[in-house]
Image (cartoon, rainbow, N blue to C red):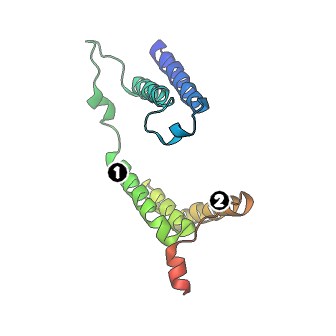
Amino acid sequence: MSKDTVGALFFLVLSLLYGLMTFNIPLNVMAKKAFFTARTVPTTLAVCGIIISLLLLILPSPDADGRNSIIKTFRGFKWKRAGLLLASMIFYGLIIKLVGFIISTILFLIVGFRILGEQRVKILLLASIPFVVVFWFLINKILGVYLEPGSLFFFLRD
């Protein structure tokens, strides 16, 4: 690792810790709903520090002539796959209230695995259904967090 990478990692950890500490800044009752509070500037500084350190880690080091080539950095990414995953996340957010947590999450995982290249139906089902059911059981039954079954469930039940 180069000195620049170590410095960027140190700056990232420092910014993350600083951002976590901003939650310890006390607010009075009147300021909790205000747009600008005692936490606003420190939180903004922490977010800026995180963004800058991530850019330092992601962007390439300077070429021999001293310039960075951002186009070279992002050329090899699979943008279509990333866009499809983003679209599936948006779709998941739109259907979760309608069909409920279990069905929408199973569908989201199956679609996500397909986008990432998994073709075998058996693997798709075995990787998504048991995981979602166990996760739902832990959240709903063990931790006691109620997850609504979805409005479609109530519509079909009547």
Distance, label 2 to label 1, CA atoms, is: 27 Å
* Side (left or right) of 142 relative to 17: right
* Side (left or right) of 6 relative to 138: left
Question: Where does residue 139 sit, x and y in percent of width and height?
Answer: 67, 58
Q: Which mark is residue 44?
A: none
Question: Where does residue 82 sit, x and y in percent of width and height?
Answer: 37, 48
Pick the residue in front: 154 or 71: 154
Question: Where does residue 26 sit, x and y in percent of width and height?
Answer: 60, 31
Name which quarter of the figure residue 101 lies in.
bottom right
Q: Is the residue marked by circle 2 packed among few (<14), some (14-19), or many (20+) residues within 10 Å? A: few
Pick the residue in front: 40 or 17: 40
- Label 2: which residue? 135
Name which quarter of the figure residue 111 lies in.
bottom left
Describe the element under mark 1 as helix, strand or loop: helix
93 vs 4: above or below:
below
Q: Amino acid at mark 2?
A: Phe
55 vs 111: above or below:
above
Q: Nearer the viewer, mark 2 or mark 1?
A: 2
Q: Amino acid at mark 1?
A: Gly
What residue is at 50 percent from the left and 82 percent from the top? 155
Taking the image as drawn, is residue 44 in sight? yes
57 vs 32: above or below:
above
Name which quarter of the figure residue 140 lies in.
bottom right
- Label 1: which residue? 83
Taking the image as drawn, is residue 1 in sight? no
Describe the element under mark 2 as helix, strand or loop: helix
**Which badge, 2 or 1, is on the more N-terminal residue?**
1
What residue is at 40 percent from the left and 53 percent from the top? 85
What residue is at 53 percent from the left and 39 percent from the top? 30
